[in-house]
Image: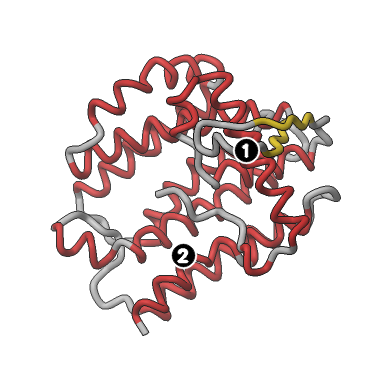
Amino acid sequence: MFGYILLSKANANKQETKEYRAHYCGLCHVLKEKYGKKGMMSLSYDMVFLELLLSDLYDQERETVTESCPVHPLSRHQATFTSASRYAADMEILLYYYSLLDNAYDEKKDIKKAEEYKNYAENVSRLYPREAKAVKDGLIKIHEEEEKNNKDLVYMSSLFGNILGEIFVWKKDDFFAPELRAIGESIGRFVYIMDAWCDKEKDKKKGIYNPIPEGMDKDEVHSLLLESAASASETFERLPLDEYVPILRNILYSGIWVKYEIKEKKND
């Protein structure tokens, strides 16, 4: 259920793409520093958005290094990171671990792989008990509703929205916490619905639960996606951001739709 919150390269200029890539590599740098190669394997685009958002909102001092990495050993590149990168890296590990457990629950795979990240996730849980509780409790609730074959897509998406809502709040009881939670909740709903829509045919073939009810058509799904995206964007525009606004807007207004557009082109 990850990999949807990314930059639309088609709608970004060279400088924006370069900056985004530097923060992506910066998050990878921090994951490697904190968790080694296993940390790097958990890297996704989703937490880059969170890192950029928090770094901008809280005016985090950034550090940039030029390095090579196992993925691109022959070319050196810039990696930019801030204090928010460390929080985003911890959330990446937490979400990755529970996503592996989720795969083990749904498709009986990744069980051994999940065990490799268990100690990392437990350490993160001790540092961030609020976030860890939200992820664990939220996924348990989702699984309970899946067992009931709950097809209320709005309700099911809100459960995942609650998870991301807590993840997006870096500093509890902070002035910006309500807005950050609202953005996370809206994006979480969007991601859940998008993932369900993209996996609908595959899940049907495998006999796996999918929250989209029979008879719900593309227009209805699209309307729910638009509602969630608009809610996230409306709250985002109220925040006092200045440094990464073009990149963040690209992601919110274009990037989150990339995989939807790919799916629709295949269906044409």
Against 43, residue 222 (above or below) is below
How many marks are shown on the rendered structure? 2
Farthest residue, direction front: 74
Determine the residue positioned at 72% across, 35% down: 80
Q: Which mark is residue 259?
A: 2
Against 200, residue 42 (above or below) is above
As helix, strand or loop, the secondary structure at mark 1 comes to: helix
Q: Which-is-in-front pick, marks 1 and 2?
A: 1
Against 44, residue 217 (above or below) is below
- Residue 137 picture location, percent across and down: 39, 32
Residue at mark 1 to residue at mark 2: CA–CA distance? 22 Å
Q: Is residue 60 left or right of residue 268?
A: right
Residue at the spot of label 1: 25
Residue 63, quarter of the rendered image: top right
Farthest residue, direction bottom: 268
- Residue 38 picture location, percent across and down: 43, 25
Q: Which mark is residue 72?
A: none
* Crowd class of label 2 (few under 14; some 14 to 19; many from 20; radius 10 Å): some
